[in-house]
Amino acid sequence: MDKSDISFNLRDMLEEQSKILITIMRSQTKKCLLKRAELNCRNHTVLQWLRENSESVTFNKLVEVFNFLKKHMDEEEKKNHGDHVDITFVAHGAIRDFMIPASCLLPLPTITDVVLYAPWNCITSGAAYGIATGRIQPEHRVFKCRKNNDCKTPDEKHRPINLPNHWNSMKKAGDQMIPNITVSPLRADDGVWEYFKYLTATHGELGKNKIVIPFILPGKEDESFPFSVVTLALSLVLLSSRFKATFHLNACLGDHSAGQKFDKDYLQRQYAYTVDGTLMTCSSDAYRSSPKINKHIDATDACRLS
């Protein structure tokens, strides 16, 4: 074996040891984070959920999401926000496979509410800026078919029956069962974040106490993350900050269950349900003070259907 072979083998061995060390460190960090969550949790249902799932794959990505959110919130700490902020999380999303108590999205007192905007089984487009600024109101929702000219269902049939005149508050839902929500990072070519920045430049910055976090993880675009892990990670980040927060989710909630789909009647009773292929956009009324807006937001950031 010559020197080049020895050097190559040594490099491989060091890389393998480094990977093992990183895995061990992440495992230990995850245990520490979950232990801290248990110590600060005040809800029996959430506490039981944390303990039952502490060794499951549910929390495998907790450390990664925690580090991602902490980086963002450390920057926001430097700004002139008050002690209570509104945080909007912009991601691709879906509902999948099983139900969890809504209270599991509010694991610690640092998150005072989690607000969902899309009805169940609905995809969204162009609502992120309206949500982040607080301009969008329930009357600004516009429902239509995502297929545009190739739709067999008229737009009026895409509007949910008995649509509530309020958003879907997880605080109010309490221990009511809701679908498991998963989120995926934005893609560089999907136009979501670029469109948000365009609206910001056209209609103004978010303002004090308003924070937006685009879920951008280069190289991880095809991965999905339980939204319950995102809210847990954020609540843990906030424990070490001066903030408490209302957490707003801008993401599609289409049913991507691998097997049997969720019960439509139950989801309708929980909040609202849309037929397959329904797109929710934001009407121009939300931006009346900004004359440059189009009649309806174009579907540039409709969630991918994978």
Image (cartoon, rainbow, N blue to C red):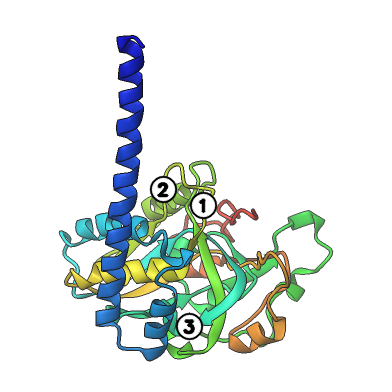
Which residue is found at the position 31% from the left and 71% from the top? 34
Q: Residue furthest front?
A: 1
Q: CA distance from mark 3 to mark 2?
A: 26 Å
| Amino acid type for the residue under numbered disc 2 | Leu
Which residue is denoted by mark 3 in the rendering?
102
Q: Earlier in the sequence, mark 2 or mark 1?
A: 2
Q: Which disc, if any, is residue 223?
A: 1
Left or right, residue 170 beside residue 152: left
Q: Amino acid at mark 1?
A: Glu
Side of 299 where 127 appears, left or right: left
Residue 277 lies, with reference to residue 301, above or below; the image says: below
Please name whichever residue, 70 or 281, is drawn nearer the observer in this view of the structure: 70
Residue 212 image-quadrant placement: bottom left
Label 3 crowd bin: few (<14), some (14–19), many (20+), radius 10 Å? many
The quadrant of the image that shows the N terminus is top left
How far apart marks 3 and 1 lie (CA) works out to 23 Å
Mark 3, secondary structure of its residue: helix
Q: CA distance from mark 2 to mark 1?
A: 10 Å
| Disc nearer the start of the sequence (3/1) | 3
- How many C-alpha atoms fall within 10 Å of the one at disc 1: few (<14), some, or many (≥20)? few
Q: Are marks 3 and 1 in contact (CB under 8 Å)?
A: no
The residue under the point 84% across, 64% down is 152
Callout in the foreground (2, 1)? 1
